[in-house]
Amino acid sequence: MRGVPLEIACDESGSEGEKLIGGQTGVFAHAGVRLSLEEAAACLVELRRRIRSPAVEYKANHLLRTKHRRVLEWFLGPLGPVHGRAHVYLVDKKRQLANGLRALVGPGIRPDDELLAAFNDVLRTRNRRDPAAGSFFAMAGDTAELRAKVGRARDAKTLDPLVPAILRAIEYWSAEGEPVFLVHDEQPSLKGDRLALIESSPGLAGVKFVDSRTDPRVQVADFLVGVARRIAEDALNGNGDGILTGLLAPYVDPASLWD
Protein backbone atom coordinates (compact mmCIF):
# COMPACT_ATOMS: atom_id res chain seq x y z
CA MET A 1 0.00 0.00 0.00
CA ARG A 2 1.27 3.48 -0.81
CA GLY A 3 0.06 6.93 -1.66
CA VAL A 4 -2.32 9.34 0.01
CA PRO A 5 -5.25 7.54 1.67
CA LEU A 6 -8.47 7.54 -0.29
CA GLU A 7 -11.19 9.06 1.91
CA ILE A 8 -14.50 7.23 1.68
CA ALA A 9 -17.62 8.43 3.49
CA CYS A 10 -19.95 5.67 4.70
CA ASP A 11 -23.34 5.13 6.25
CA GLU A 12 -25.75 2.24 6.80
CA SER A 13 -29.48 1.67 6.75
CA GLY A 14 -31.59 -1.13 8.18
CA SER A 15 -29.20 -2.07 10.95
CA GLU A 16 -30.94 -3.84 13.83
CA GLY A 17 -27.90 -5.55 15.29
CA GLU A 18 -28.29 -9.31 15.54
CA LYS A 19 -32.05 -9.26 14.94
CA LEU A 20 -32.39 -10.57 11.40
CA ILE A 21 -36.05 -11.52 11.32
CA GLY A 22 -39.19 -9.97 12.77
CA GLY A 23 -37.68 -6.50 12.90
CA GLN A 24 -38.48 -3.25 11.13
CA THR A 25 -36.49 -3.99 7.97
CA GLY A 26 -35.77 -7.01 5.80
CA VAL A 27 -32.69 -5.59 4.10
CA PHE A 28 -29.46 -4.18 5.51
CA ALA A 29 -27.53 -1.73 3.35
CA HIS A 30 -24.11 -0.12 3.63
CA ALA A 31 -22.84 2.54 1.25
CA GLY A 32 -19.60 4.37 0.63
CA VAL A 33 -19.07 7.43 -1.58
CA ARG A 34 -15.88 8.92 -2.97
CA LEU A 35 -16.54 12.65 -3.02
CA SER A 36 -14.62 15.68 -1.82
CA LEU A 37 -16.17 17.92 0.80
CA GLU A 38 -16.84 20.52 -1.89
CA GLU A 39 -18.46 18.02 -4.26
CA ALA A 40 -20.65 16.61 -1.51
CA ALA A 41 -21.71 20.07 -0.39
CA ALA A 42 -22.61 20.97 -3.98
CA CYS A 43 -24.65 17.76 -4.25
CA LEU A 44 -26.64 18.68 -1.17
CA VAL A 45 -27.26 22.18 -2.48
CA GLU A 46 -28.52 20.74 -5.76
CA LEU A 47 -30.76 18.23 -3.99
CA ARG A 48 -32.24 21.00 -1.89
CA ARG A 49 -32.79 23.12 -5.00
CA ARG A 50 -34.58 20.30 -6.79
CA ILE A 51 -36.61 19.00 -3.85
CA ARG A 52 -37.58 22.41 -2.46
CA SER A 53 -38.65 21.17 0.96
CA PRO A 54 -38.64 23.51 3.97
CA ALA A 55 -37.16 20.74 6.12
CA VAL A 56 -33.99 21.71 7.98
CA GLU A 57 -32.39 18.29 7.42
CA TYR A 58 -32.96 16.33 4.24
CA LYS A 59 -33.08 12.53 4.39
CA ALA A 60 -33.55 9.69 1.93
CA ASN A 61 -37.30 9.77 2.51
CA HIS A 62 -37.46 13.10 0.69
CA LEU A 63 -36.04 11.49 -2.44
CA LEU A 64 -38.37 8.50 -2.15
CA ARG A 65 -41.55 10.55 -2.35
CA THR A 66 -43.48 10.08 -5.56
CA LYS A 67 -43.41 13.78 -6.40
CA HIS A 68 -39.60 13.70 -6.35
CA ARG A 69 -39.23 10.70 -8.65
CA ARG A 70 -37.29 12.68 -11.26
CA VAL A 71 -34.85 13.88 -8.61
CA LEU A 72 -34.25 10.31 -7.47
CA GLU A 73 -33.65 9.14 -11.02
CA TRP A 74 -31.20 12.01 -11.53
CA PHE A 75 -29.40 11.21 -8.26
CA LEU A 76 -28.86 7.55 -9.17
CA GLY A 77 -28.53 8.03 -12.91
CA PRO A 78 -25.46 8.37 -15.13
CA LEU A 79 -25.53 12.18 -14.88
CA GLY A 80 -25.96 12.15 -11.13
CA PRO A 81 -23.37 13.15 -8.52
CA VAL A 82 -22.51 9.65 -7.26
CA HIS A 83 -22.50 7.63 -10.46
CA GLY A 84 -19.23 5.70 -10.72
CA ARG A 85 -18.17 7.03 -7.34
CA ALA A 86 -20.15 4.93 -4.91
CA HIS A 87 -20.53 1.36 -3.68
CA VAL A 88 -23.49 -0.34 -1.99
CA TYR A 89 -23.47 -3.63 -0.12
CA LEU A 90 -26.87 -5.25 0.44
CA VAL A 91 -27.91 -8.09 2.73
CA ASP A 92 -31.22 -9.95 2.65
CA LYS A 93 -31.38 -10.59 6.39
CA LYS A 94 -33.66 -13.59 6.23
CA ARG A 95 -31.50 -15.17 3.55
CA GLN A 96 -28.39 -14.67 5.68
CA LEU A 97 -30.12 -16.36 8.58
CA ALA A 98 -31.36 -19.23 6.39
CA ASN A 99 -27.86 -19.77 5.01
CA GLY A 100 -26.50 -19.97 8.54
CA LEU A 101 -29.18 -22.46 9.53
CA ARG A 102 -28.47 -24.71 6.56
CA ALA A 103 -24.76 -24.59 7.34
CA LEU A 104 -25.46 -25.98 10.84
CA VAL A 105 -28.33 -28.37 10.24
CA GLY A 106 -27.88 -29.37 6.61
CA PRO A 107 -29.21 -28.23 3.23
CA GLY A 108 -32.34 -30.34 3.47
CA ILE A 109 -33.99 -28.30 6.22
CA ARG A 110 -36.87 -26.00 5.32
CA PRO A 111 -36.29 -22.66 7.05
CA ASP A 112 -39.78 -21.24 7.55
CA ASP A 113 -40.22 -18.00 9.50
CA GLU A 114 -41.01 -19.74 12.79
CA LEU A 115 -37.87 -21.86 12.65
CA LEU A 116 -35.74 -18.90 11.55
CA ALA A 117 -37.06 -16.76 14.40
CA ALA A 118 -36.22 -19.50 16.90
CA PHE A 119 -32.77 -19.89 15.35
CA ASN A 120 -32.19 -16.14 15.56
CA ASP A 121 -33.24 -16.17 19.22
CA VAL A 122 -30.97 -19.04 20.18
CA LEU A 123 -27.98 -17.38 18.52
CA ARG A 124 -28.68 -14.06 20.22
CA THR A 125 -28.96 -15.46 23.74
CA ARG A 126 -25.96 -14.86 25.95
CA ASN A 127 -26.54 -17.62 28.49
CA ARG A 128 -26.00 -21.36 28.34
CA ARG A 129 -29.34 -22.49 29.69
CA ASP A 130 -31.33 -24.83 27.51
CA PRO A 131 -34.00 -22.98 25.53
CA ALA A 132 -37.58 -23.58 26.63
CA ALA A 133 -39.72 -26.28 25.05
CA GLY A 134 -40.99 -25.33 21.62
CA SER A 135 -37.77 -23.49 20.85
CA PHE A 136 -35.22 -24.02 18.12
CA PHE A 137 -33.89 -27.36 19.34
CA ALA A 138 -37.36 -28.81 19.67
CA MET A 139 -38.03 -27.91 16.03
CA ALA A 140 -34.63 -28.70 14.50
CA GLY A 141 -33.67 -31.77 16.47
CA ASP A 142 -32.18 -31.74 19.95
CA THR A 143 -28.78 -33.40 19.64
CA ALA A 144 -25.50 -32.79 21.40
CA GLU A 145 -23.84 -32.19 18.05
CA LEU A 146 -26.31 -29.47 17.07
CA ARG A 147 -26.06 -27.81 20.47
CA ALA A 148 -22.27 -27.71 20.10
CA LYS A 149 -22.53 -26.19 16.64
CA VAL A 150 -24.99 -23.57 17.82
CA GLY A 151 -22.73 -22.74 20.75
CA ARG A 152 -19.79 -22.15 18.43
CA ALA A 153 -21.92 -20.03 16.11
CA ARG A 154 -23.17 -18.01 19.08
CA ASP A 155 -19.64 -17.39 20.31
CA ALA A 156 -18.51 -16.29 16.86
CA LYS A 157 -21.05 -13.42 16.91
CA THR A 158 -21.45 -13.37 13.14
CA LEU A 159 -25.11 -12.31 12.95
CA ASP A 160 -24.77 -8.53 12.75
CA PRO A 161 -24.00 -7.64 9.09
CA LEU A 162 -22.47 -4.25 9.94
CA VAL A 163 -18.85 -5.29 10.53
CA PRO A 164 -18.71 -7.61 7.48
CA ALA A 165 -20.15 -4.77 5.38
CA ILE A 166 -17.46 -2.35 6.56
CA LEU A 167 -14.73 -4.92 5.94
CA ARG A 168 -16.10 -5.45 2.44
CA ALA A 169 -16.10 -1.68 1.83
CA ILE A 170 -12.42 -1.51 2.80
CA GLU A 171 -11.63 -4.44 0.52
CA TYR A 172 -13.54 -2.89 -2.37
CA TRP A 173 -12.09 0.61 -2.18
CA SER A 174 -8.50 -0.54 -1.55
CA ALA A 175 -8.51 -3.08 -4.39
CA GLU A 176 -6.36 -0.89 -6.61
CA GLY A 177 -3.62 -0.62 -3.99
CA GLU A 178 -4.42 2.71 -2.36
CA PRO A 179 -4.96 2.81 1.42
CA VAL A 180 -8.45 3.78 2.53
CA PHE A 181 -9.50 6.15 5.28
CA LEU A 182 -13.13 5.70 6.27
CA VAL A 183 -15.27 8.57 7.52
CA HIS A 184 -18.26 6.75 8.95
CA ASP A 185 -21.50 7.82 10.55
CA GLU A 186 -21.40 7.32 14.30
CA GLN A 187 -21.92 3.70 15.37
CA PRO A 188 -21.96 3.18 19.17
CA SER A 189 -21.90 -0.61 18.68
CA LEU A 190 -18.49 -0.49 16.99
CA LYS A 191 -16.09 -0.76 19.88
CA GLY A 192 -13.86 -3.33 21.55
CA ASP A 193 -13.22 -6.45 19.49
CA ARG A 194 -15.52 -5.28 16.69
CA LEU A 195 -13.62 -2.06 16.20
CA ALA A 196 -10.28 -3.84 16.55
CA LEU A 197 -11.27 -6.22 13.75
CA ILE A 198 -12.05 -3.29 11.47
CA GLU A 199 -8.86 -1.44 12.37
CA SER A 200 -6.76 -4.51 11.63
CA SER A 201 -8.16 -4.86 8.13
CA PRO A 202 -5.53 -4.82 5.34
CA GLY A 203 -5.96 -1.71 3.24
CA LEU A 204 -7.31 0.51 6.02
CA ALA A 205 -5.32 3.64 6.78
CA GLY A 206 -7.71 4.75 9.51
CA VAL A 207 -11.33 5.27 10.48
CA LYS A 208 -13.16 8.23 12.00
CA PHE A 209 -16.74 8.26 13.27
CA VAL A 210 -18.65 11.51 12.84
CA ASP A 211 -22.10 12.97 13.28
CA SER A 212 -23.49 12.83 9.74
CA ARG A 213 -24.77 16.40 10.12
CA THR A 214 -21.19 17.66 10.32
CA ASP A 215 -19.91 16.05 7.12
CA PRO A 216 -21.67 16.54 3.76
CA ARG A 217 -19.99 13.41 2.35
CA VAL A 218 -21.63 11.24 4.99
CA GLN A 219 -24.94 12.99 4.31
CA VAL A 220 -24.68 12.01 0.65
CA ALA A 221 -23.88 8.43 1.72
CA ASP A 222 -26.96 8.59 3.93
CA PHE A 223 -29.11 9.55 0.93
CA LEU A 224 -27.67 6.75 -1.18
CA VAL A 225 -27.90 4.01 1.42
CA GLY A 226 -31.44 4.99 2.40
CA VAL A 227 -32.81 4.86 -1.14
CA ALA A 228 -30.81 1.70 -1.91
CA ARG A 229 -32.28 -0.16 1.05
CA ARG A 230 -35.84 0.88 0.16
CA ILE A 231 -35.45 -0.08 -3.51
CA ALA A 232 -33.96 -3.44 -2.52
CA GLU A 233 -36.62 -4.09 0.09
CA ASP A 234 -39.44 -3.28 -2.34
CA ALA A 235 -37.93 -5.72 -4.83
CA LEU A 236 -37.58 -8.37 -2.13
CA ASN A 237 -41.25 -7.97 -1.20
CA GLY A 238 -42.43 -8.31 -4.79
CA ASN A 239 -43.15 -4.58 -5.19
CA GLY A 240 -40.00 -3.73 -7.08
CA ASP A 241 -39.69 -0.84 -9.51
CA GLY A 242 -37.80 -2.03 -12.57
CA ILE A 243 -36.45 1.41 -13.46
CA LEU A 244 -35.14 2.16 -9.98
CA THR A 245 -33.75 -1.36 -9.56
CA GLY A 246 -31.92 -0.90 -12.85
CA LEU A 247 -30.52 2.47 -11.77
CA LEU A 248 -29.34 0.98 -8.49
CA ALA A 249 -27.72 -2.08 -10.08
CA PRO A 250 -24.37 -0.44 -11.05
CA TYR A 251 -23.75 0.48 -7.41
CA VAL A 252 -24.46 -2.93 -5.90
CA ASP A 253 -21.50 -5.04 -4.82
CA PRO A 254 -21.64 -8.46 -6.51
CA ALA A 255 -20.71 -9.95 -3.13
CA SER A 256 -24.00 -8.69 -1.71
CA LEU A 257 -26.43 -11.23 -0.27
CA TRP A 258 -29.28 -9.96 -2.41
CA ASP A 259 -30.59 -10.92 -5.85
Image (cartoon, rainbow, N blue to C red):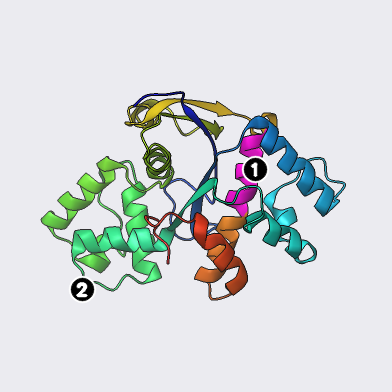
Q: Looking at the image, tell me whether mark 1 or mark 2 is earlier in sequence order.
A: 2
Place of residue 84 in the rendered image (x, y in percent of width and height, measured from the top left): 54, 50
In this image, 118 relative to 55: left or right? left
Q: Is residue 232 visible?
A: yes
- Characterize the local packing of mark 2: few (<14), some (14-19) or many (20 or more) Cα atoms within 10 angstroms: few
Residue that appears at 31% across and 65% down: 134
Residue that appears at 48% across and 61% down: 22
Looking at the rendered structure, the kind of residue marked 1 is Val
Label 1, label 2: how far apart the Cα atoms are = 43 Å
Can residue 220 be found in the magenta stretch?
yes
The picture quadrant where one finds residue 216 is: top right
Q: Which residue is mark 2?
A: 108
Image position of 148 with respect to 70: above or below:
above
Front residue (pair 109, 84): 84
In this image, 141 relative to 69: left or right? left
Front residue (pair 166, 86): 86
Badge 1 element: helix
Image position of 104 with respect to 15: above or below:
below
Can residue 87 be found in the magenta stretch?
no
Looking at the rendered structure, the kind of residue marked 2 is Gly
Give the label on residue 114, or none: none
Q: Residue furthest bottom?
A: 238
The picture quadrant where one finds residue 245 is: bottom right
Place of residue 85 in the rendered image (x, y in percent of width and height, measured from the top left): 55, 45
Q: Which residue is mark 1?
A: 220
Give the magenta-colored segment's residue range: 216-226
In this image, 140 relative to 16: left or right? left
Image position of 169 with respect to 107: above or below:
above
